[in-house]
Image (tube, rainbow, N blue to C red):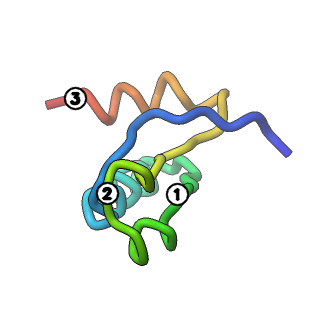
Amino acid sequence: MAELVTIAEFDNVNQAHVLKARLQSEGIRVYLLNENLNSILPGAFSMVKVQVDLNDSFRAMDVLYED
């Protein structure tokens, strides 16, 4: 399996899904860590982490900061 890196963290699972959709539209495979835990226990201890493959990380950061 490829090495994953976290490019963003959200305390709201919906915000993580918006970024996931943007990245997937650019052809980047995205993984959400703590997605279900955040739904059960929202708060700082269960931040949703948006992760991508290390090889896609620079392109993903470009998408994240393009605005």
Residue assigned mark 1 = 32
Q: Position of residue 34 (x, y in %)?
A: 53, 60
Circles 1 and 3: CB atoms closer than 8 Å: no
**Dot 2 alpha-carbon crowd within 10 angstroms: few under 14, some 14 to 19, many 20 or more:** some
Quarter of the image for residue 40 reads bottom left
- Corner quadrant of residue 52: top right
Between the residue at mark 2 and the residue at mark 3, the CA separation in whole angstroms equals 28 Å
39 left or right of 55? left
Residue at x 58% of width, y 52% of height: 29
Q: CA distance from mark 2 to mark 1?
A: 16 Å
User: Under tag 1, what secondary structure?
Assistant: strand
Give the labeled residue for mark 2.
Answer: 43
Report the amino acid beneath label 1: Leu
Left or right of 1 on screen, residue 8: left
Mark before the other along the chain sequence, 2 or 3: 2
- Say which residue appears at 66% left-offset and 29% top-offset: 54
Q: Which mark is residue 66?
A: 3
Are there few (<14), some (14-19), or many (20+) residues within 10 Å of tag 1?
Answer: some
Quadrant of the snapshot with the N terminus: top right
Q: Is residue 50 above or below residue 33?
A: above
